[in-house]
Image: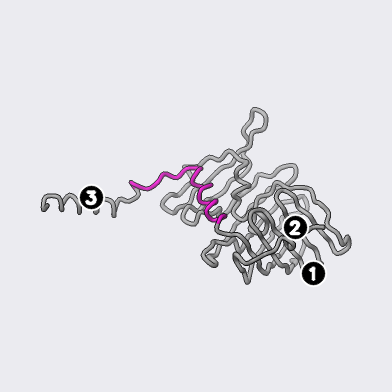
Amino acid sequence: MNRIRPQFFYLAFIMLFQGPLFAEEFTVNTIFEKLKVNDGKVQAISADMEITLSGGGMKGIRQIAKYFYKSPDKAKVDILTPIKNIMVMKGNETYIKTANSGKYVRANSSDSAGSGANNDLFQYKYLQQFDLEIDSARSKPDDDMYFIIGYKTDGENKVKYIDFIFDDEKGVVAQYAIAGSSSFPAMELVQEYSAISGCLIPVKATAKMNLPSGSYTSVVSLKNVKVNNNLGDEIFNVK
């Protein structure tokens, strides 16, 4: 028995101080597994929302809204001031009701990524459309930060479309940049998360876009967040 003990403690020492040698390898599948875990914890959200827009000669526009989310794919942004507007997202469809129209109109779909203010909280569904590759040269495993490049196939060409940073410790997309397309401009976005009721929630998203009319910045913040409360489907009714 005494002969076994030194070997046991030596093995324990190796496992304690050289744990990374036994760590699970980070792969593209790791991204989706961790995003799915975070996504699955959040069944519903209601919160106060503040939206600020600046740039392009604007001094700054501030909007106050109510935000509602219900898993798996429903969201509603009810803008209260300065002008009453409502946007409802159901799956891939978006509906908008303005103060002037008084009724919902289906909007053109966009290929923009999630920002915490829509119906894909963690970009779990959005990122599945890309061929993802890990950029090992820029990644920092010691800091649990991995740079990921997302490609789309255009004929025989593989085109870079999105570049993002994945926080492996939290299991979330920390920030990303979209190259842009014919239907959506190039955009850079940084997301901030808070732990609320045992769930990670994207509570702030800062987006920067360069348009022909100038450079614009949008900041979306959630406050007074309630998680997994009971939300009826009637909240998302567009009839």
Quick check: 217 left or right of 20? right
> Alpha-carbon distance for marks 1 and 2?
19 Å
Give the mark count: 3
Is 213 displayed left or right of 127 in the figure? right
Q: Is residue 141 visible?
A: yes
Q: Quarter of the image holding residue 130?
A: top right
Task: Kindly identify the residue that appears in the image at 11 percent across and 50 percent down.
Answer: 3
Q: Amino acid at mark 1?
A: Pro
Q: Amino acid at mark 3?
A: Leu
Tell me the residue that label 1 is attached to.
82
**In the rendered image of this protein, does residue 223 appear above or below residue 210?**
below
Tell me the SS state at disc 2: strand
Q: Find residue 171 and report its horizontal and vertical position in percent.
A: 51, 54
For the record, the magenta segment spans 21-40
Secondary element under disc 3, as helix, strand or loop, is helix
Q: Secondary structure at mark 1?
A: loop
Q: Position of residue 153 (x, y in %)?
A: 64, 33
**Mark toward the start of the polypeptide (1 vs 3):** 3
The label shown at residue 11 is 3
Question: Is residue 35 found inside the magenta-colored segment of the image?
Answer: yes
Mark 3 burial class by Cα count in 10 Å: few <14, some 14-19, many 20+: few
Q: Quadrant of residue 105?
A: bottom right
Q: Which mark is residue 88?
A: 2
Indicate the position of residue 42 as horizontal and vertical percent values: 58, 59
Instruction: Give the mark nearer the N terminus: 1 vs 2.
Output: 1
- Which residue occupies the extreme left position in the image? 2
Q: The residue under label 2 is which amino acid type?
A: Val
